[in-house]
Amino acid sequence: MNMDRRVLIDGQQRVTTVYLLLAALLRQIKSGAIEARKDTLPEFIRYEYLMDRYDESDQKLKLKLVKDDQEALGKIMDEDDHLVEGSNVTENYRYFLERISQTDLSADQLKDAVESLEVIDIMLESDDDAQLIFESLNSTGLSLSEGDKIRNYVLMNLPEDLQNRYYEQYWNIIEANTDYEVSSFIRDYIAAKTRKTPIISRVYPSFRSYAKAFKTDSRWLIFYGIPCITAESSDWDEPIRG
């Protein structure tokens, strides 16, 4: 039995935060660090919010992250004593473990607080422009980094298997080789190519404009057209020229 799966285009950090809070609450109930009114609460949290009771595959978690983060999340949900070090997922999980161990609230109060959250759910049709909607939703509040926006622009409308392939084969390497300063690197790249240096908050629109002027597919530009930051750039498919 497979779960109905959806791609989340906005709110990933908030959903992940709530997921980790519930995972930490589950762990602390089982360890006795916080009390629950009923013995059935851990099972309820696990299968109502965190895992598919009937899925025996590697996809049983109800949240799917990028590969490195997914590995860290899997260790947490397997209750593995050897968590993935250096992962923000692990660090945030440990933060919640500590805060829950210090709270005067009960497990039921924390669960009720999570259930009182209000979520705006906007379902898109297959022919909707997910990238345009993503940009609209991110026009207010705390912005993503310019590198995050470029990554989403490049990958968002691809099928899931290609998203995973290109993320692992190219984007992951770009992040590692730039010390996760992708925004600054692409700003320097654009400056070198156009002789105009965009301010850091305008790197994403500058990249889009350059990609359009370059008259090529943006995925080819970021992964193949900047070979100095990916060791395997020559493996890229034949570029798609507009």
Image (spheres, helix red, strand yellow):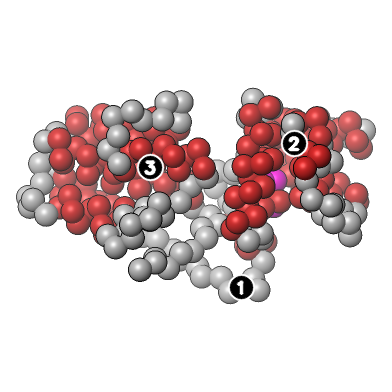
Tell me whether the residue at label 2 lies in contact with that at label 3, contact meaning CB atoms closer than 8 angstroms.
Answer: no
Whether 110 is drawn above or below 9: the answer is above
| Residue 55 appears in the figure | yes
Image: magenta residue range: 149-153
Which label's residue is closer to the chain start, 1 or 3? 3
Residue depicted at x 86% and y 32%: 191
Residue drawn at (39%, 66%), measured in percent from left and top? 3
Q: Is residue 152 magenta?
A: yes
Label located before the other in sequence (2 or 3): 3
| Above or below: residue 123 compared with residue 74 | below
131 sits left or right of 53 in the view: right
Query: Any mark on residue 232, and which?
Result: 2
**Residue at the spot of label 1:** 126
Residue 84 placement, left or right of 137: left
* Residue 35 picture quarter: top left
Q: Residue at x 58, y 74 (%)?
A: 125
Q: Callout 3, which amino acid? A: Gly
Percent of width and height locating residue 227: 81, 34
Residue 30: image x %, image y %?
A: 15, 40
Q: Nearer the viewer, mark 2 or mark 1?
A: 2
Residue tagged by mark 3?
74
